[in-house]
Image (tube, helix red, strand yellow):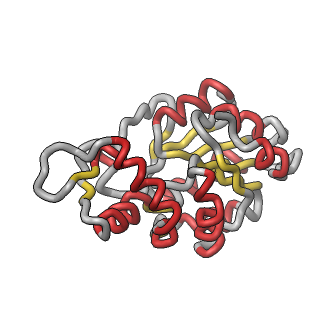
Amino acid sequence: MEPSSTDLQTCKVRADAPLVIVDVDEVLARFMHGFGTFIARHGFELRFDRYALFQNIYRPGETEHLDLIAGRMLFDDFFRDGSGDLLPAIGAADALADLSGRADVVILTNAPEHGRQSRARWLKTHGFDYPLVINSGPKGPSAADLASRTSGPSVFIDDLLPQLDSVATSAPAITRFQMVADERLRPLAPADPERHTRIDLWPELKTAIELKLFL
């Protein structure tokens, strides 16, 4: 599925400004923490066995994870009823607020379309009131589209290695950073530090972004 053409068409990027393209889950929001709280209310538990979502959902006392269809239903319900309970990543709002004074910021997320309003509301509530692009699938084409609108340098931040690889393929000039907000997930996250710089703390990440965009 293509990203929302309306989102991309209406997203404003200054022609000469540096650009920060940033993911939400496990970058701006501690998704697994909030999702774990949500599914616990429905009688399930989240285990940190691997860097995955549905394969980490279990019924208490069972050794086999929940089937993927049931996991997807919980995921969809979360974006309808539970996503407002997400905690922001420590330091993220302050870092982007500072960067946004000197660069454009665009949020590029793969949230489901039915979660658009709750996602936008959460972002605004927690200090992330920046243009929002709802994407589906690989983010490389959308990131390339956004970066092509400015002559300034661009950076992309995501937790998922496949998304970082997608951007590297579609727009290799974009500097890529991997960031994982939940400390329980950090040891499990596949990484390729030779291709994508890995920084898991926002104060340090902000400094690295500044070096790429402003020096």
Instruction: Looking at the picture, tell me which residue is in the foreground, 105 or 37.
Output: 37
Q: Considering the image in quadrants, where does the N terminus appear?
A: top right
Where does residue 115 sit, x and y in percent of width and height? 58, 58
Instruction: Looking at the picture, tell me which residue is in the foreground, 2 or 139.
Output: 2
- Is 95 rendered above or below residue 52? below
Q: Residue at x 54, y 43 (%)?
A: 177
Q: Residue at x 48, y 54 (%)?
A: 76
Counting labels gives 0
Of all residues, the one furthest to the top in this rendering is 169
Where does residue 74 sit, x and y in percent of width and height? 39, 56
Q: Quadrant of residue 184?
A: bottom left
Instruction: Looking at the picture, tell me which residue is in the foreground, 5 or 184.
Output: 5
Instruction: Looking at the picture, tell me which residue is in the foreground, 78 or 180.
Output: 78
Q: Residue at x 46, y 35 (%)?
A: 161
Of all residues, the one furthest to the right in this rendering is 15
Q: Residue at x 61, y 40 (%)?
A: 136
Of all residues, the one furthest to the bottom in this rendering is 125
Where does residue 45 sit, x and y in percent of width and height? 24, 59
- Is 32 rendered above or below residue 55? below
Q: Is residue 126 left or right of residue 50?
A: right
- Is 187 rendered above or below residue 165? below
Where does residue 107 sit, x and y in percent of width and height? 66, 53
Q: Is residue 29 left or right of residue 188?
A: right
- Is 215 rendered above or below residue 45? above
